Amino acid sequence: MFGPRITTIFASRWKALWWAAGMIVTTISLVPSADDKDAAGNAPGSPPTGHHNPWSKN
């Protein structure tokens, strides 16, 4: 279903380290940086720029 079985990945410390490194690289590549957010501006469907507290009475 998800490729190799977990028991075969963690059968070796080196395989476990490579798997963990792959997860870190995947996470870093998927999460946008703060610079990307500023460059995108106010795209349709995105929240408005600036901070607004939804719990404030204003």
Image (cartoon, rainbow, N blue to C red):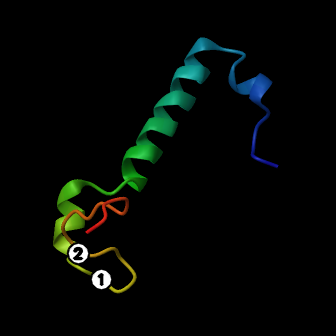
Helix, strand or loop at disc 1?
loop
**Mark 1: which amino acid?**
Ala
Q: Secondary structure at mark 2?
A: helix
Residue 43 badge: 1
| Image coords of residue 48 (percent x, y) | 27, 76
* Residue appearing at x 79%, y 33% in the figure: 5
Q: Quadrant of residue 11?
A: top right
The answer to whether 7 appears left or right of 50 in the picture is right
> Is 56 placed above or below 40 here?
above
Please give left or right for residue 46 compared with residue 1 in the image.
left
Amino acid at circle 2:
Ala
Nearer-the-camera pick, 54 or 3: 54
Q: Counting other residues with Cα less than 10 Å from the Cα at mark 1, is it few (<14), some (14-19), or many (20 or more)?
A: few
Q: x%, y% of residue 46?
A: 35, 76
Closer to us: 54 or 4: 54
Label 1 vs label 2: CA separation? 7 Å
Give how far across and how far down residue 22 sits, in percent: 50, 37
> Looking at the picture, how far across and down is residue 2, in whole percent?
75, 46
Extreme top residue here? 13
Residue sitting at x 26%, y 54%: 33
Callout 2 environment at 10 Å: few (<14), some (14 to 19), or many (20+)?
Answer: few
Q: Any mark on residue 40, and which?
A: 2
In the image, residue 38 above or below residue 3: below
Q: Residue furthest bottom?
A: 44
Image position of 1 (left or right of 15): right
Q: Quadrant for the C terminus, please.
A: bottom left
Quadrant location of residue 6? Answer: top right
Residue at point 17%, 71% (across, down):
39
Give yes or no for contact between labels 1 and 2 (Cβ–Cβ under 8 Å). Answer: yes
* Foreground of the two, 53 or 24: 53
